[in-house]
Amino acid sequence: MSKFVERAKQSFRTDHTWDRVGRYSVIGAKAAPAAAAGYLLEKVPIVGWLPRYRPRWLISDVIAGLTLAVMLIPQSLAYAAIATIPVEYGLMASWLPATIYAFMGTSKDLSTGPTSLIGLLTSEAVHALEPQGYRAQDIAACVALWMGVYGIILGFLKLGFLLEFISEPVLTGFISAAAIIIGSGQVKNLIGQSDIGDGFAAIVHDTFATLPDADGNTAAIGVTGIVMLCLMQHIGTRWGKKYKVAWLVSILRAFAVLVLYTGISYAVNKDRDSDDYLFAVTKMTQRGIIPPKVPESALINKTATHAIAAFIAAAVEHVAIARAFGARGNYLTDPSQELCYLGVTNFVNSFFNAMGVGGAMSRTAVNAQCNVRSPLSGFVTTGAVLICLYELTDALYWIPKATLAAIVITAIWPLIGHWRTYYGFWRTSLADFIAAMLAFWLTLFVNSETGIGAGVGWSVVYYLLRLAWQRTQSIGSNSRSEIVRSIDAARGMPSNIPDDVRVFRFNENVFFPNATRIKAQLVDGVKTYHAPTYSSANGAEADRMWSVVGIQRVKKLRKRAGITDVDALPPIRLVIMDFSKVTHTDATALHAMKEVFAEIKKYGGKDVEIRFAACQQNVRFRFERAGWDMVDADSSSGSDSPAPEGAKTVRCYRNVADAVTDRGSVMREDINVVVKGDETPPEGSAEHREKV
């Protein structure tokens, strides 16, 4: 026994793995208190940006909050109708999210609440479980609860990268099919039909079969509502940028139509019995907030799988909207934190019998157009929705269902992907096109879970097949030119890299699972080791936007890189991407690469040039099929031609060494230290500002 103990001790002393476990355990224990405090502060971003809030921003935030409330109220009622639950539960889902987002959100623009997509996926769960005797609103609340649980798990454990396995073509096909299902499902309310089945095929068949039985009064309300909504939207599109009134008419169109037809409904139906109204109305009677309660445990167990598709769709859409408007507003959003918010909000909301919520593109766009300055606008939105719940219930009773259907149909139209989008997938990658078609047709005619699952499954299988059937090129005595090119590529990095040059070498294929991560690495690399060109977006601390997430991230990256003197950082003039190890890319990666071009030029200035090196023919061909202009560069004689113009034009070199040494098209740098009182620096020079 003693011999066994001695051997065990000796094994522990000499075992490298146990040594690493012990060493990292000590390091982790020492860092745990500070890391835990930092982690908790990250979960409440308002702590970071509220001290930077300026009182003059309050007017913009109040206006944006009121505008969003005016949009949110009719949309929440309409999207509850999509979920086939009483419309008041749409309002129940709308009052709390904006307030929670003020504390936990990382985007100043994002508007959350019920969406048409969540409504559709909730309705699938309602149709499946309602025959078992459960109330529709209870089923919707349980779906929201599970959406919250999934969001909390992925967000707090920082597992949001798993959502990146849903490629852009799969998401496009799924959302397009979902939008068509939503629109077709509202036709019965638009023209007053009954006995319409579930599923797209049944809806189309039953709609035409019962068309002679449609109600004329309901159809008049619904069709004229669509005409008015489209007309006001056209006014905003045509004259909105020139006239503020036209823009206001466009963004308030749903509210205006709702008020108009609610007034008409009250005028013609108030003296009639509830069974003899000229057209169907919502008959909403709930006043105030429903007291919170815990959903039934048996129902919670039955809705776990039904909520997966709803969560995936809501999470992907929510994170994508936050990221897009963050890039547009030049601030950084945190996808994991957004998932934390999505989880907490849906979990808490579910106890008020509310349906699931997520980010909404249309409301977010309007919020940005209102020049919102911070998430504090959410408090105003919450207040307006609560006033509606407590004071306007009598008016909401008379809202025509046909008007809500008209609002839904006009709202989902932009969600349907344009045919050029699918043709772009076809030209770029047949595999991406097949993934989009699988997601589209199976979602349309089977269900959403099957559509998403088939699209993602196809993408995974295709990738595995690529790994199993990699092509090996044979090089013999008759291919000496290929050997020469291989030797050139093997030269790798040149002996000297100028300070204003940054080289990135990809060690793996660039496609949908890693496109977002690689994009972040490229942009972070430039921001870590190079100074920005001065502008309203990148300048002195006082000129920055409200968000501190991006600033803190860059500080951490520079600290990790050992950079102490930030003022000594060189500007960025040339970025080179080494594609020598990349044999495959796809549509999602090409879209991410366009965003990389835009963000690097925004940070370093429009004169920054981005070059590709050692780009293999099939990868280059895919870029060209997607519309990129791949310009060959003959570095042997030196290039004095101007740098390629446009975000989708790039100069290609045989290897990194040639790309670095060809400096003919890179702007020479003239450095001016600008202090208060200096004249404006000469045009075309790089400018560095110092505080004195």
Image (cartoon, rainbow, N blue to C red):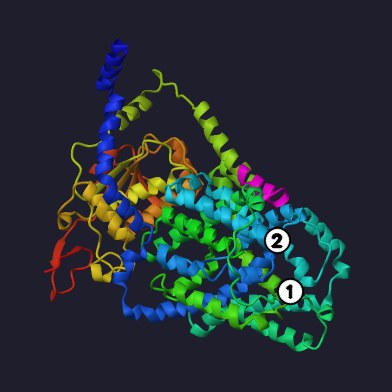
Question: Which element type, helix, strand or loop, lies under badge 1?
Answer: helix
Asked if 644 appears above or below 244 in the picture, the reply is above
In the displayed structure image, the side of residue 288 where residue 690 appears, left or right: left
The amino acid type, in three-letter code, at marker 2 is Ala
Q: Nearer the viewer, residue 419 or 351?
A: 351
Q: Which residue is found at the position 68% from the left and 73% from the top?
A: 404
Q: Of helix, strand and loop, which mostly describes the magenta segment?
A: helix
Q: Quadrant of the C terminus?
A: bottom left
The span picked out in magenta is 440-453
What is the x, y in percent for residue 632?
37, 44
Estimate the spatial distance between the alpha carbons at disc 1 and disc 2, rounded to whole Å: 21 Å
Q: Which residue is found at the position 68% from the left and 47% from the top?
A: 442
In the displayed structure image, the side of residue 131 where residue 323 appears, left or right: left
Question: Which element type, helix, strand or loop, lies under badge 2?
Answer: helix
> Label 2, on which residue?
136
Residue 81 occupies quadrant? bottom right
Q: Say whether residue 648 is visible.
A: no
Q: Nearer the viewer, residue 681 or 543?
A: 543
The amino acid type, in three-letter code, at marker 1 is Ala
Residue farthest toward the front in the current orientation of the protein: 1
> Label 1, on which residue?
402
